[in-house]
Amino acid sequence: MLADLHRDLARMRAARVEAKPVLTGRVVACDGGLVEVAGLPLSIGSLGAIEQADGSESLAEVIGFRAGHSLMMLLGDTVLLRPDSCVRARGEPGKVRVGEALLGRAVDGLGEPIDGGAPLALKRNWQLVGRRERALERAPVSEPFDCGVRAINALATMGVGQRLGVIAGSGVGKSVLIDTMTAHSSADVTVVALIGERAREVSDFVARHMHGTRRERMVVVAVPADHAPNLRLRAAQYATSIAEYFRSKGKRVLLILDSLTRVAHAARELALVLGEPGAARGYPPSALATVTKLVERAGNSARSGGAVTGLYTVLADGDDANDPVVDTARAILDGHILLSRDLAQRGHYPAIDVPASLSRVMDDLVTPERLEAARQLRALIAAREENRDLVLMGAYRAGSDPVLDSALEASQRIDAFLRQPRGEGVALDASLEQLAALL
C-alpha cells in the first residue's frame, strides 16, 4: 500500500499544473484501440491524456461520440491501459502549434521533435483542419515552377501553387523521384510529410536532406507505418497546417506528401472502427472525402501573396490505375505524373509514362512554341510505345506511318532526353532549351 502511495505522489509531482480547470473522465471500455470515456465531453479532434498502469500517460484523440460517451483512439499502444483509468483534457481542441522554430527540424504528428534536438518553443496556434477559403480568394496558377526533373519541366510543366500527383505501383520509383525533386526544386520553405513509410526511409531522408543551407528552409513531419492510424492522419493534416502558416507569411512553400494513399488507408481504418460501411472497394465515403479536403488546402493565396505547391505521391494498389484513391486524386489534382513499371524494368529512370502524364496548367505557363514542341514529342513517344511490339517482331514496314518513322529515327535522342541520372537536377530553362534542340 505504501508503494502505491509513493507512486501516486510521484505521479502528482511530475504532473503539469494547469492555470485553469481541467476536464477529466474515466475509461469505461476499450475495444481494439477504441477507448470509450465517460464524463469527458470534448469536441472531435481534441486530445486527452489517459493514465497508464505504471503511472505514465498515453495520448488519445476524440474521434466520435456514442450514448453520451466520448470515443477516443490512442495515439500509441494499449498495453498498459486498465479499466477506470483517469483521462484529462490536453491542449486546445482542434488546434496545433506552428512557428518559425520548426525550420530545420524533424517532428512527429504531435509536433514533438524526433531528431534528438531541443524541445520546440511554438507560440502560434493554427487550425489542424485548416481555414477554409472562398474560391475567389485563390489566385490563379500563372508562374512556372522548377522541379529539377527534365521530363516534367519540359513535357508537364508545373506551376507555383499547383497540386501534382505522382502515381505508381510499389517499387516503381516514386520515392526516388520525390527525393530528386526535393533536392533540386526552388521554394522558400519545403515541408515534407512522410506518412506510413518505413522507419529506415525516414532516417535516410533526414540524413540526405537535413544538412547545409537547405536544412534552414525545410521541415520534416514523419510518422512510420507502425503507428496508430489517427496519428498518421494527424501528421498529414499537421504538415499541411505548417505549409498554410508559412503561406500566410507570404512564403512560397513546397508541400511534399508521401503518400496520399497511406492517408486514405488511415482514414479508412478510423471510419471502419466507427462503424461506417465500406463503399468503393472497402473505402468508406469519408475516407475519400479526407483526401479531397487535404488536397484542396494547397494552392495560391490572393490575400497574402504566398503559395503552397503540393506534390503528392499516390500508390496504385496492384498497379490498378482505377483504384478509388488514384481515381479520386486524379480528379481533384491539377495534374499527374504516371510512372510505368515496364519502363522501370528496362532500367529507364525516371520511369515516366509521358503520354499518360499531364499538367492541367501547362498551357498558361509556357510559350506557344514550347507547348507545340512538347505536343510533338509526346506524339512521337506515344507512336513508338504503341507500336513497340510490332517493331520488335519486324512486322513494321518503314514508310507506312511518317510519325512512327520519325519516332524510330529519333529514338535514341528521345531516350537520352527523358532519362536523367538519379540525384541530378536539370533547371527549367535548360529543360525547355533541350526540348527545342531535340526537335
Image: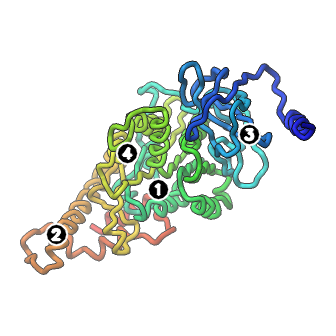
Q: Secondary structure at mark 4?
A: helix
Residue receiving disc 4: 325
Q: Hey, what amino acid is under mark 3?
A: Gln
Numbered mark located on residue 52 in the image? 3
Badge 2 density bin: few <14, some 14–19, many ≥20, Cα 10 Å: few
Residue receiving disc 2: 387
Q: CA distance from mark 2 to mark 1?
A: 31 Å
Q: CA distance from mark 2 to mark 3?
A: 65 Å
Numbered mark located on residue 178 in the image? none
Lower sequence index among marks 1 and 4: 1
Residues 365 and 177: in front is 177
In this rendering, the label closer to the viewer, 3 or 1: 3
Q: CA distance from mark 1 to mark 4?
A: 24 Å
Badge 4 density bin: few <14, some 14–19, many ≥20, Cα 10 Å: many
Lower sequence index among marks 2 and 3: 3
Percent position (x, y) of residue 87? 71, 29
Q: Is residue 87 left or right of residue 176?
A: right
Percent position (x, y) of residue 143? 43, 45
Percent position (x, y) of residue 136? 42, 26
Q: CA distance from mark 2 to mark 4?
A: 31 Å
Quadrant of the image occupied by residue 409? bottom left
Numbered mark located on residue 147 in the image? 1
Q: Secondary structure at mark 1?
A: loop
Count the labels in the image. 4
